[in-house]
Amino acid sequence: GRKIWGMLRYKSLLKVRRKVERVLVSSKYGVALEMTNTLLSLTGCFLFATRTYYEFDTSDGAVTVMRHINDAILGISAFLLCDFLLRCFAAESLLRFLNTRFALTEAFTILPPFILTIMARIENQPLSSPKEVRWVLQQVIALRFVRIYKLMKAFIGGGGNAGEVKRQMVHVCLTLLTIIFCFASMFYVCETFMVDADEKEAFWGVEHLVFHDAVYFSIVTVTTVGYGDFKPLSWLGKLLVVCTVATTIIVIPSQTNQLLALMSVQSPYARARYKVKAKQRHAIVCGQLTATNAANFIAEFFHEDHGMSDGHLVILCPETPNGQMEILVHSRSHQVTYLEGSPLIEEDLERAQASRCDKVILLADILCADSQAEDSGTILRALAIRKYLSLQPGCADIPIILELRMPGSRHHFQSSAFGGTGDKANIICIDEIRLNLIAKSCLCPGFCTMISNLVMSSSAEISDASNVEPWVREYAAGCGLEIYRTQLSPRFKKMKFIEVAHVVYRELGCTMFGIEIKDPKGRSKVVINPARFEIQSSHLDDLWVFVLADDQEQADKISTYALEKGEKRRQEARTEIKKYGTLDAQSLSSMAGLKSPTWPNVTQMRMSSTASGTGRAASNRRISFVSEMSSHIEYNNDKMLDMKRKVLAMNTHETNLQDATRDSVSSMQGHVLLCGYSPSMYHFLATLRPKHLQEHPKIVILHPDLEEYDWDTQAAYFSDVTYIKGHPHRPADLIRAGVAGASQAVILSPSEHSTEHDERMTDAEVVFIYQSIIKANPHVHIVCEIVSPGSVPLLCAGPQFSTKKSNPPDLEMDDLLFSSKFQQPFCSGNVYFFANVMDLLACQAFFNPHLITILRKLVVLNPEAANIRDPTLSSSELFSQVIPPGFGGKRYGELFEYLTMKKDTVCLGLYRKFQSGAPKQASSNLKMFSSFVNNRNNPDVRYVVTAPSPEIILREDDHMYILQVPPTLALGAGFQVASASMDLTGLGSRPPSEGNSHSAPDYPSHHLTGGENVSFNERSQRTGVISNSISSPIRSLPPALDLPGEE
């Protein structure tokens, strides 16, 4: 029975010991206890230094202070003794625990004060009087300073690139501080109790030492300066100096060498830390950035249009910056901070001050060959950032902008616990946007250039005195436009969207092309040119419009149009509140003279984000939206196929890769030749297969091997898609693919890029294929992807077509015309900087979060568009057409009025030929451009004009970019159409408007393409442009509307 009882007691005691050990080692209470012990030990050292100033003072006050100090030291020793015994009890092995450095220090520094106190009490002497007590007590107390190393455990954490360097630096400093303090304490004790006062006064000039004198002598000795004003007089003091100097010479250099070794392994960027300045907002960019892309991103971020001169950009990358990147960062050191690190490490996020940033931008490596692996890494980094921010107080709503390569990867991020949707995560699917944009450029040549210019801010200003050709002024004016979001003035209520677009362009010079509206459930919907949608007063609170404008200030004039001064101030205040959150009374009272800030107050946005989620009814009648597809689902079930077939021309049966393979199609005419392939090819093919096209171009894919790709989910249900096995850079394979009869050619950037340091080398294959196609078919319109903008001049047919420096020199014009945006291939829409544009799109989304949504609406064909229950909210599609006959020689403003008021159409820009012939005084680079235009091998070289000025004179061969409702939705919206199988080569004729004094001029209303009914192949061979249009009803302003400037 006794044995069993003993065993039970032992097990119970063992269980208690383990529990105590777990609390001391791994709980927050154990850490708190450890820090308390350390602070008490340092307090004891401070008391030791304090008592040296009262050591030889015999006054009553000094004796009282000494007694209190001794009592405090005894109390601290008692607490430390209890802690020491508790740790001995919790130790699994007592001997192993007592053999540690800190345990030995505790044993030597805790017990002597108690032993000497007991001896003093036995001898009936005050504790402060005997020399032995002071000698031993002060000797051992100084050793407690070693516990200062415990502070590193609490205040110097973890891993990361800078963790070990920081830890070693602190360790060196603490070692030096410990040597100085301990030597000063022991030197004070030795020289005080072993040397007479007369001898000390004779050598030192003082009768008694105090602690700061001992510290001074310790520093002089350790640093080997040796001024000679103090020197050891006792034999023990001299031995102490020898030991201290020897210890310093051995320990400090050894630890310093370890520090230097760590610093040599890590770059200074791995140890750097961003310091937030007062009232300075900053953004964090993570991912792979080359020097060229970083320069473009930084220039876009700090562009004057964004008002970001006082902001800061933190670049967090895992790689050490190369020479070019270092030069770039140093030149922008007041605006840019480069940190080497990973967002997967919390310490690196702390170094970048992620909890205090406005937004985090995650850029994908667009040149990575493995798209799936790159997306996985990007999503993992985004989740790590989101988790870190969610654990910081008030930081859960910091938005994240991330780039993903494949559209299907969006689901993996949004379905996670930290993924988030809406404003918290703005996702850019690179393959989805770029492939849709390239395919759209086949239907509407030059459209990729228009989108690129809208994404890239430009400061190109042509003065009136500059000697340039007209096309330079027209093109440069369009480069300065961007997409902005603003609200409508109350004066526009009861008007239809197309009528408002007409007034906005005529009176304010902005092109309005889309709206964002909420349904009763608060869900937002973006619609492109809902021409028939009537704006009610109940819409004005939750309705936003998208416009092409020079800046935000010009766009915001729409919200205050035709308002009186008092109404204008109130409307500006309401617009600011809806954009950026709640404003105080002082801001509201001064809103009349306040410009719209380009960077909203993030704190206000976070406070108002919850309130803004509940929108009121969008109309007196019920408006219902079907949720929009977030991405192309990578499988085809019956429901998905039925939904796609409503808007896409798709087969009812699959065509496998073997059936689609042909040996040669050299005799084919009017087809689209695709050189390359992408895992997300569905988006390219779907854009070329909308149902509203009367005829669909055949597609020929030239690629070495498509068996490694998923043909079944990407191309199996599309007709007239042919695969030719071959290499695009081989002329024989191009001939087999029918390059001679192709109307369009697309060159995709290869998935495996060169590892050369020169970025232009990655475009070598694209340049070779481009030149081979031009040589085989000079009339084909080519759209190619390139990585480096510096490769654009290489796409010219020869040196005689390249721009040269002006004579006499004009540096401003040379810099402008030598930039990649003003090179002929880019102006003509033959080149798409997909890597640069996607990064700049992420930058623009920082200032305009709705830009990604509106861009997807312009270029991505949505299969659910046919499911919208309100016909007046049908979204328009983009088409390219020749201007109507009779408008040659007229102003562009007249064309815009005719299209809006009679055709329910919004025109975004023109695609026109370069004017042949340069002025006599024109610079040589302009003459070279003219020689390129007049070259007989390139008869139809054009350039893009975005949102032209109303005063531009039209030409008969100008093409226009228009937004019209497709016929599949036009019938339900009440649009007048001739028949179900309408002629898509032009707009049907319409009867004149009756009884309306405000109707537009009665311009010719027959076919916009000249009334010629030709087939797709014939038209594409003649003009190189695929023209598509639909009919629309006559529109006129309501008689009750009093428009300024009209009689």
Image (tube, grey):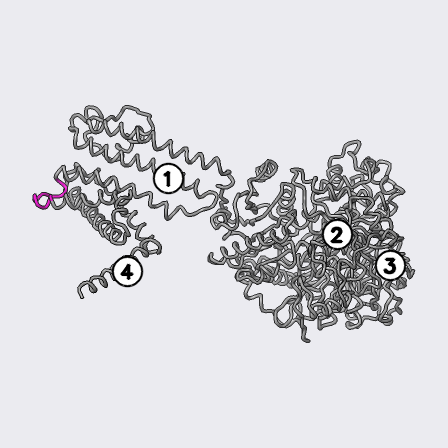
Q: How much space separates mark 4 and mark 1, taking CA atoms? A: 37 Å
| Cβ–Cβ under 8 Å for marks 1 and 2 | no
Q: Relative to residue 532, is residue 228 depicted above or below? A: above
| Cβ–Cβ under 8 Å for marks 3 and 4 | no
The amino acid at mark 2 is Cys
Look at mark 4 in the image and give the residue it sits on.
15
The amino acid at mark 4 is Lys
User: Foreground residue, 802 or 432?
Assistant: 432
Identify the image quadrant of residue 638: bottom right
Residue 293 in the image: state x and y as whole percent.
64, 44
The amino acid at mark 1 is His
Look at mark 2 in the image and give the residue it sits on.
448
Residue at 58%, 65% (x, y): give it: 612
Residue 57 in the image: state x and y as whole percent.
16, 38
Q: Residue furthest left?
A: 123
User: Foreground residue, 853 or 568?
Assistant: 853
Q: Which of the image's four quarters has the N terminus?
A: bottom left
Q: Crowding at label 4, few (<14), some or many (≥20) Cα neighbours within 10 Å?
A: few
Q: Which is nearer the N-term, disc 3 or disc 4?
A: 4
Q: Which is nearer the N-term, disc 2 or disc 3?
A: 2
Magenta-drawn stretch, dominant element (helix, strand or loop): loop
Q: How much space separates mark 3 and mark 4, taking CA atoms? A: 87 Å
Foreground mark, 3 or 4? Answer: 4
Q: How much space separates mark 2 and mark 3, taking CA atoms? A: 22 Å
Q: Relative to residue 777, is residue 995 depicted above or below? A: below
Foreground mark, 2 or 3? Answer: 3
- Residue 236 sits inside the magenta stretch: no
Look at mark 1 in the image and give the residue it sits on.
171
Q: Which of the image's four quarters has the C terminus?
A: bottom right
Magenta stretch: give its range.
119-129
Residue 857 makes an appearance in the image:
no
Give left or right: position of 309 versus 935.
left
